[in-house]
Image (cartoon, grey):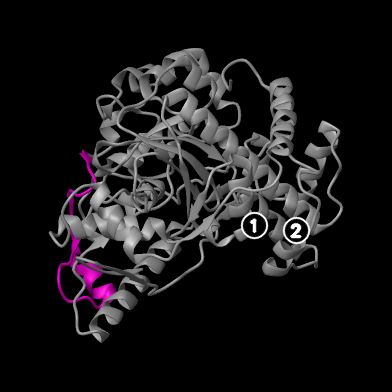
């Protein structure tokens, strides 16, 4: 994405898009990170050409990706194999091993992260004793790995580092207590960087590969894509909740300090670090991954579905007929998603979806319920007031999901921008370059005045949503384990 920024101006132009196809080899699911890096180089070439076509020059580069995953580098700086995908099964059972060393209460008090079975500490615990980890001299989280290849300079950007479950959110530095207890060598990580810090300039190899004939500066942004997406929330008052929707739904609040109470841990809320000293107090919800996997399954079965038609049909289905817990771990893995949704309904004694439209309505009703619960829990646990819900990311295009979320929460929903992550990335770069000034409030005022937004007012039967929420809560209470996943 190419961002054009000036006082009163904020525009995005898509320069290049490329697929991200994980690959399973010898039973392990990997990211094809070299193909992704080639896509980045192709994108930079296209971006520079687009800027030159307008008579300008590329002024900076910022990189954000997903969280928790990493690449290992050897003594010579070479990558020691493709990074393992967080949805790989290698971390199965690892949470119990970690809990035997650090009780979940201690771990949460130290790091403030919700329990997710693929957090970096579980990946590193699962990898202990492996040849790759034994040979590694450097560990780079995915956006830091891309930045390293582009510049030759290594660093660890803080917002993404906070997802490793190795950062103390109060001090915003590494938790040596956790690392030492689990035998994790923090010297593998290069020094921490903050959003806005310089991350180097394009090296000669990258300049040659992209056709960019000058050493363009690379800036550390909120390199965890959700950190950039929250910067890209066009809020005009502090009383807002956000839902960053895409493969995941990240629903929560922006706070000044972490909430590290036992009640917060049991509610499975995370305290990830944000831009300008903020805390992203949120819960991870399965998100549109469930629908994406359904679409992939139906296509593989020879029953491809047109998404727009499917959503229209889902809107006409009976509301709240079938609902599941969209935060349940059974929906993390790929494959057989429609079957797993049907099995969850059957176990709970609810009607089993019979058609793709009914399955889609089940997914969207369930996501709206999960959004409702996350926002209600976040404001209860933090003591904050919420008057507006902002939906940003790809889900902002899903009118049915936005409408259902407004109905479920009983609050107005402001949808957009869909490209909040790219916009937040660009805004931090622009401020670092001196094009913009001020804090997050000023950046968001520019967003609100320049981006197309759509508002959804709550309607429908609030009592029906409450009854459906109680059904899901009841099922969750029956299935909930005590430790370490409580």
Q: Is residue 215 magenta?
A: yes
In percent of width and height, residue 1 lies at 36, 68
First to last magenta residue range: 191-217
Contact (CB < 8 A) between labels 2 and 1? yes
Residue 397 sits in quarter: bottom right
Q: Is residue 138 visible?
A: no
Residue linked to disc 2: 314
Query: Are there few (<14), some (14-19), or many (20+) residues within 10 Å of tag 2?
Result: many
Q: Secondary structure at mark 2?
A: helix
Q: Is residue 110 magenta?
A: no
| Dot 2 or dot 1, earlier in sequence | 2
On the rendered structure, is 366 left or right of 197? right
Question: Which is nearer the eye, 454 or 138?
Answer: 454
On the rendered structure, is 149 left or right of 83? left
Q: Is residue 393 visible?
A: yes
Q: Which mark is residue 400?
A: 1
* Residue at (64, 48) in percent of width and height: 459
């Amino acid at each position: 994405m190419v961002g054009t920024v000036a006082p009163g101006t904020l525009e995005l132009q898509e320069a290049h898009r490329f697929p991200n196809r994980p690959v399973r080899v010898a039973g392990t699911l990997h990211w094809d990170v070299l193909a992704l890096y080639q896509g980045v180089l192709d994108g930079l070439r296209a971006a520079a050409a687009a800027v030159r076509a307008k008579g300008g020059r590329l002024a900076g580069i910022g990189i954000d990706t997903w969280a928790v995953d990493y690449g290992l580098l050897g003594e010579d700086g070479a990558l020691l194999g493709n990074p393992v995908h967080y949805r790989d099964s290698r971390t199965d059972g690892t949470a119990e091993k970690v809990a035997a060393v650090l009780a979940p209460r201690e771990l949460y008090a130290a790091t403030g992260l919700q329990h997710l079975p693929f957090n970096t500490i579980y990946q590193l615990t699962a990898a202990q004793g492996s040849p790759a980890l034994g040979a590694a001299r450097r560990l780079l989280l995915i956006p830091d790995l891309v930045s390293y290849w582009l510049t030759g300079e290594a660093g660890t950007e803080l917002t993404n580092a906070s997802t490793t479950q190795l950062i103390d959110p109060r001090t915003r530095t590494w938790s040596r207590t956790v690392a030492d207890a689990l035998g994790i060598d923090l010297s593998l990580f290069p020094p921490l960087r903050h959003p806005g810090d310089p991350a180097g300039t394009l090296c000669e190899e990258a300049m040659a590969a992209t056709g960019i004939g000058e050493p363009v500066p690379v800036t550390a942004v909120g390199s965890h894509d959700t950190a950039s997406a929250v910067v890209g929330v066009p809020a005009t008052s502090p009383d807002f909740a956000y839902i960053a929707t895409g493969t995941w739904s990240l629903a929560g609040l922006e706070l000044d300090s972490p909430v590290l109470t036992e009640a917060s841990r049991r509610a499975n809320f995370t305290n990830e670090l944000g831009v300008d000293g903020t805390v992203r107090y949120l819960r991870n919800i399965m998100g549109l991954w469930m629908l994406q996997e359904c679409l992939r399954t139906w296509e593989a079965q020879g029953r491809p579905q047109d998404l727009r038609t499917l959503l229209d049909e889902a809107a006409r289905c009976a509301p709240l007929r079938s609902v599941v817990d969209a935060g349940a771990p059974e929906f993390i893995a790929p494959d057989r998603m429609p079957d797993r949704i049907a099995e969850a309904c059957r176990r709970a004694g609810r009607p089993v979806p019979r058609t793709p439209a009914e399955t889609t309505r089940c997914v969207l009703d369930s996501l709206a319920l999960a959004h409702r619960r996350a926002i209600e829990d976040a404001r209860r646990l933090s003591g904050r007031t919420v008057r507006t819900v902002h939906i940003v990311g790809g889900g902002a295009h899903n009118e049915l999901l936005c409408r259902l979320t407004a109905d479920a929460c009983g609050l107005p929903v402001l949808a957009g921008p869909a490209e909040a992550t790219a916009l937040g990335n660009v805004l931090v770069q622009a401020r670092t370059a001196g094009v913009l000034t001020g804090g997050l409030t000023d950046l968001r005022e520019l967003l609100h005045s320049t981006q197309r937004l759509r508002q959804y007012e709550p309607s429908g039967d609030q009592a029906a949503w409450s009854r459906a929420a109680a059904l899901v809560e009841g099922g969750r209470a029956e299935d909930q384990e005590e430790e370490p996943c409580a």
